[in-house]
Image (tube, rainbow, N blue to C red):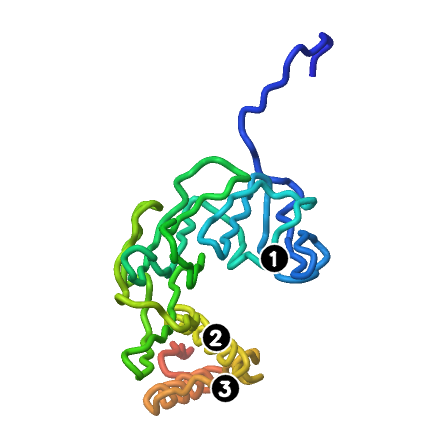
Amino acid sequence: MTKYPIRKVTQISVGKSSLGAMQIYMDEVSGKLNQDERGKYLGAFDTGSKLLSIYKDGSYEVNELDLNKKYDVNNIVEIGNYTENTVISAVYFEGEKGWTLVKRFKIETSTYDQKFVFISESAGSKLYFASMEKTPLIKYSYNVGKTKEEKEVALTEFIDVKGWKALGNKLIDAKLLKVEKLVSEQQDEEIVTNLEIESEESNITDSDTAIPSAPKIIPDLKLPSESNNTKEEKSGDNERDKPGYKPGDTIEFDF
């Protein structure tokens, strides 16, 4: 680079790894990250990738990828690859108002290795559900008197993305008994599409891929008039070839 001693090195930007992305897993017993395919698959991480963790107490944390870091598996709701477009969808009970609320937000904080609480901190508040999926669909149940009611809701249709400190929109004015994550229609369509593609590929037969046979050569057919003319031409030629006088020859006599 240079023959002179270097006084200072400054990083201008973070580039992507030339070795390719690392496939990262989390051991669900020890909470340690690994590349040995042990535990839950977290995704492909490249240079500069971040890890987002959502906890049961209604907080989130963004970390640099560190294979030596140990996570509290028992208190994690969801963990995965974080990007600037990641949206957290959450359902929680707000203790002061006594409502169940839904909120969706992007990460606005820039500090790493620090937890940020995104639900109300009033007494009795509780996180029911949180996800980083693009189109989360849930089924929830609650009591109306002595009757148990169940309903489904697509969170992306229920509320738009708002600020991370916003309370959210009211789902019901009571506590929930249970929240269950369902497969969304978009995910279902992707599965069906993949199945259709596979079935189309499997239906290809040998006849579809066979090399087309060479076209048959059909001899030229001549019209009767053309064949007659040919015969006349041939007969004329034969007449000329015969010995003796032919029409048009000049004959001289001596007296």
Q: Are marks 2 and 1 in contact (CB under 8 Å)?
A: no
Q: Amino acid at mark 1?
A: Val
As drawn, is 66 to the left or to the right of 187? right
Q: Is residue 201 above or below residue 59?
A: below
Separation of residues labelled 1 and 3 (CA atoms): 114 Å
Q: Quadrant of the C terminus?
A: bottom left
Q: Which mark is residue 73?
A: 1
Q: Which residue is mark 2?
A: 197
Separation of residues labelled 2 and 1 (CA atoms): 38 Å
- Going 31% across and 84% down the picture, which residue do you hit? 147
Give the SS element for disc 3.
loop
Whether residue 229 is visible: yes
Q: Is residue 104 above or below residue 185?
A: above
Answer few, some or many: residues within 10 Å of disc 2's Cα (few below 14, many 20 plus, some between 14 and 19). few
Whether residue 245 is visible: no
Q: Position of residue 226 (x, y in %)?
A: 35, 86
Q: Which residue is mark 3?
A: 242
As drawn, is 98 to the left or to the right of 237? left
- Going 39% across and 58% down the picture, which residue do you hit? 124
Q: Are marks 1 and 3 in contact (CB under 8 Å)?
A: no
As drawn, is 219 to the left or to the right of 28? left
Give the SS element for disc 2.
helix
The tag earlier along the polypeptide, 1 or 3, is 1
Q: Position of residue 107 (x, y in %)?
A: 41, 44
